[in-house]
């Protein structure tokens, strides 16, 4: 009966489909999936490399299991967490607080985060560590 009247059980989520289309257009304008994968790898690798070489910041996730999107890290002195977050916020580096059950920090560097944003975070982390070591 539905076929006969050109009907369906429900209305498709038209707004979600529209938004997905905008995101797909944006991804293509950035060079497509291969270009995004390369950029995301560069962003993640630069932040992980910085953390791994640091005596001040730590990441305990095994290399084989590291995310390109969410990079958790801790400070060598947890009592500095609040100062780190407050000073980061002053630099417009936002939403760095880690998960409530784990603590520490978490940098979410999803597709829309430009490489310059990761560079700004690393610059801030470097300066913060120099002042607090």
Image: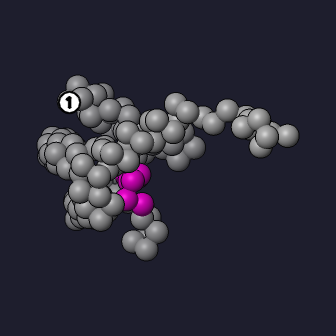
Name the residue located 55 percent from the left edge and 33 percent from the top edge. Answer: 14
Q: Is 124 or 36 nearer to us in this picture?
A: 36
Q: How are the residues colored?
A: one colour
Q: Which residue is mark 1?
A: 91
Query: In the displayed structure, does residue 25 sit left or right of residue 61?
Result: left
Residue 107 position, x and y percent, is 35, 46
Please tell me whether mark 1 sits on a helix, a strand or a loop.
loop
Q: Is 107 or 40 nearer to us in this picture?
A: 40
Query: In the displayed structure, does residue 53 sit left or right of residue 65?
Result: left
Q: Is residue 96 above or below residue 55?
A: above
Residue lying furthest bottom in this view? Answer: 64
Name the residue located 24 percent from the left edge and 29 percent from the top edge. Answer: 92
Image quadrant occupied by the N terminus: top right
Residue 24 position, x and y percent, is 38, 47
Name the residue located 30 percent from the left edge and 44 percent from the top edge. Answer: 26
Q: Is 20 included in the stretch rendered in magenta?
A: no
Residue 53 position, x and y percent, is 22, 65
Residue 85 position, x and y percent, is 33, 33
Q: Is 72 included in the stretch rendered in magenta?
A: yes
Name the residue located 20 percent from the left edge and 30 percent from the top edge. Answer: 91
Tell me if residue 105 can be seen.
no
Residue 41 occupies quadrant: bottom left
Q: Residues within 10 Å of mark 1 (few under 14, many from 20)?
A: few
Residue 55 occupies quadrant: bottom left
Tell me if residue 69 can be seen.
yes
Find the magenta span and give its range: 67-73
Query: In the displayed structure, does residue 13 sit left or right of residue 76?
Result: right
Q: How many marks?
A: 1
Residue lying furthest right in this view? Answer: 1
Q: Is residue 117 above or below residue 63?
A: above
Residue lying furthest front in this view? Answer: 4
């Amino acid at each position: 009966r539905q076929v006969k009247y050109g009907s369906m059980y429900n209305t498709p989520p038209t707004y979600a489909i529209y938004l997905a289309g905008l995101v797909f257009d944006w991804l293509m304008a950035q060079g497509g999936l291969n270009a995004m994968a390369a950029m995301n790898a560069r962003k993640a690798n630069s932040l992980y490399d910085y953390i791994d070489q640091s005596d001040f910041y730590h990441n305990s996730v095994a290399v084989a299991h590291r995310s390109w999107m969410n990079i958790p890290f801790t400070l060598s002195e947890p009592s500095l967490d609040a100062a780190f977050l407050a000073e980061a916020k002053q630099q417009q580096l936002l939403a760095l607080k880690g998960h409530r059950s784990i603590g520490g920090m978490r940098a979410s560097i999803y597709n829309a985060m430009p490489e310059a944003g990761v560079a700004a975070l690393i610059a801030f982390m470097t300066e913060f560590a120099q002042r607090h070591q």
